[in-house]
Amino acid sequence: MNVICFDLEGPLSPQDNAYEVTSLIENGDVIFETLSRYDDFLALAGRENYEPGDTLALIAPFLLTHGIRESDITEVSSRARIVAGAKDLIARLKSGGWDVHIISTSYEQHARQVGAALDVDQDHISCTKLDLTGLRERLTKDDIACIQRIEEDILDIAGDDDDDETMFKRLNDFYFEELKETGFGDLFSEVRVVGGARKVEALERIAASHNISPGELVAVGDSITDFAMLGRVRDAGGVAIVFNGNEYAIPYANIALCGTDIGLVLEFAEAHARGDDAVELARALEEEYRNDPRVDCLVGADAGKISAVIDAHGRFRKLVRGEAAKLG
C-alpha cells in the first residue's frame, strides 16, 4: 500500500487554529505573534527538548487564565475552510488505494474536526492532546497571578518597538523557571506538541506499521514544524513536497508546489506509485507550471533558486492563508 502524510494547517486548511483561539482573548493576537517569534527563536537555537510548534504549549497558560475551554477550540475550528482541491485530492488518493495520514501540531479538537471533514480516519491523525479542564483544576490564585504578570510584561515590552532580546529573556525566565513553580510544573511535558522531531517520530511509526521505510513515503508540509519531517523523507529517497511553504520548510523538500489549489500533488503521488521518479516529473513540469500552480524541482537548487521559490511561495502563502501566513 502507498502511504502519504500531510501536515494539516497550510496544505489542507488555511486556518491557524491556535492563533484564532488566542485571538478570542484581549490582545491575544499580540501575545500569539510574540510567542510565535519566541518559538522560532528557541527552535532555531536548538534548545534541548524544545521542538518547532511548541507555541501551542506556550499559549496554554494564557488560554487558562482567560477561561478558554475545549469547546471554544472546537467552535473556532468549525469555521475553518478547506484548501481548494484538498477534499478531492484525498478522495482520489483513497480510491486509488493510498493510506492517507495527517501529522499535525494542531490541538486534537481542531485536527480531528478538519480530518473528519476530509474523510481521514480518526486513527490516522497524529496531533497535540490538550486537557484544559485538567490543567485548570491545578492552578492556584498565586499561579494565575504569575501568569497575569507575564502577560502584562509581554504587552509592555511589545509596545516598546518589539525589543526581542528583552522579550525573549523575560520569557525564558517565565517558562523555564517561574512556571515550573506553579501547578503547571513542566509545561512541555504537560502539553506535548506534535512538531519537529515528534512529527518525524509519528512518520516513522506510520512507516513501520506498513513495514516500509520513510523513503517509500510521500510527505507534504509547509512550515518550521515540518522541516524535519520533510528532510527525513527527502534524505531517505522519498517524495518531500512543500506546498506554499516558508523559508524554514522549502530548503528541506525536493519538490516545491505553490498555488491556490493543492490538487496537483496527485500527479506526483501517482508517479511515485507507478515507480516513476516524482522528482524528475517535477523537473519536467517546471516550465509548464510557472504561475498558478507553480512547480519547482529543488534537487541541486542553488541559493538563488531557493530564494526565488521562497518569494513565489510567500505570495501564494499570503493569498491562501491570510494573516496566518506571517507565522513561522
Image (spheres, rainbow, N blue to C red):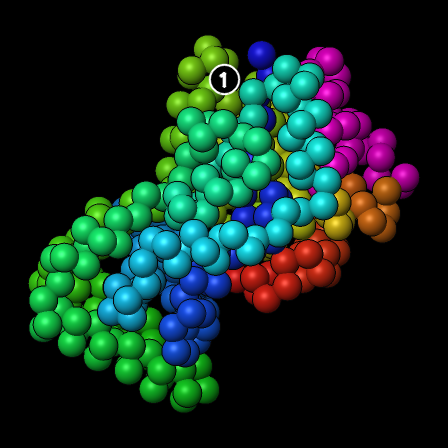
Badge 1 marks a residue whose secondary structure is loop
Place of residue 319 in the rendered image (x, y in percent of width and height, measured from the top left): 71, 60
Query: Count the marks: how many?
Result: 1
Left or right for 229, reference 47: right
The quarter of the picture where residue 156 lies is bottom left
Identified at 37% across, 54% down, the residue is: 71
Q: Main secondary structure of the magenta part?
A: helix
Q: Is residue 145 above or below residue 78?
A: below
Give the residue number, with chain letter if any, for mark 1.
213
Q: Amino acid at mark 1?
A: Ser
The quarter of the picture where residue 283 lies is top right
Identified at 10% across, 72% down, the residue is: 141
Whether residue 52 appears in this view of the structure is no
Work out which quarter of the rendered image holds the N terminus and state it: top right
Q: Is residue 136 above or below residue 23?
A: above
Left or right for 239, reference 7: right
